[in-house]
Amino acid sequence: MDLDEPFRAGLAQMLRDDAHEVLEFARPADVPPLEELHHVAVVIAEYLLPGEHGVALADRVHRAHPRTPVLLVSVCLRGGVDVVVGGREFVHALGKPIDYDHLHEHVHALASF
């Protein structure tokens, strides 16, 4: 989930090229009720989202799907990632710009979380 459509679309396409099934949403308001989403291996979302902070989204995902990890990405995460994550073992963070190989490794590691 990312407002930057070219970034979101490019990332989604790379994940699809690697045989991942991807659901894309621009904003948290676009996401259907989380209880209706099944078999979600990893959620990737921008840290700074309009209307709902990425950590709040991660908490909401965790309540609906406790075993689903959330990967937050943002230019703002270069520093205090530990502060952002706040002890949430289900939340992981990556700073932008993102190296796709590094992201791919994270996705594979988290999908078997």
Image (cartoon, helix red, strand yellow):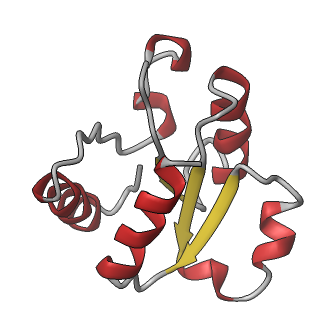
Horizontal side of 44 relative to 93 (left or right) equals left
Q: Residue furthest front?
A: 112
Q: Quadrant of residue 78?
A: bottom right
Q: Residue furthest left?
A: 17
Please give the name of the residue rendered at 41% of the width and 59% of the height, measured from the top-left corner: 108
Q: Quadrant of residue 4?
A: bottom left
Q: Residue furthest top?
A: 36
Please give the name of the residue rendered at 25% of the width and 63% of the height, measured from the top-left corner: 11
The image shows residue 95 at horizontal and vertical percentages of: 54, 81
**Front one among 110 and 6:** 110
Please give the name of the residue rendered at 65% of the width and 21% of the height, measured from the top-left corner: 64
The image shows residue 88 at horizontal and vertical percentages of: 82, 53
The image shows residue 40 at horizontal and vertical percentages of: 44, 32
Up-down relation of residue 81 to residue 90 (above or below): below
Q: Quadrant of residue 99?
A: bottom left
Up-down relation of residue 66 to residue 98 (above or below): above
The image shows residue 100 at horizontal and vertical percentages of: 30, 78
Horizontal side of 7 relative to 1 (left or right) equals left
Horizontal side of 21 relative to 111 (left or right) equals left
Please give the name of the residue rendered at 53% of the width and 20% of the height, measured from the top-left corner: 34
**Front one among 42 and 51:** 42
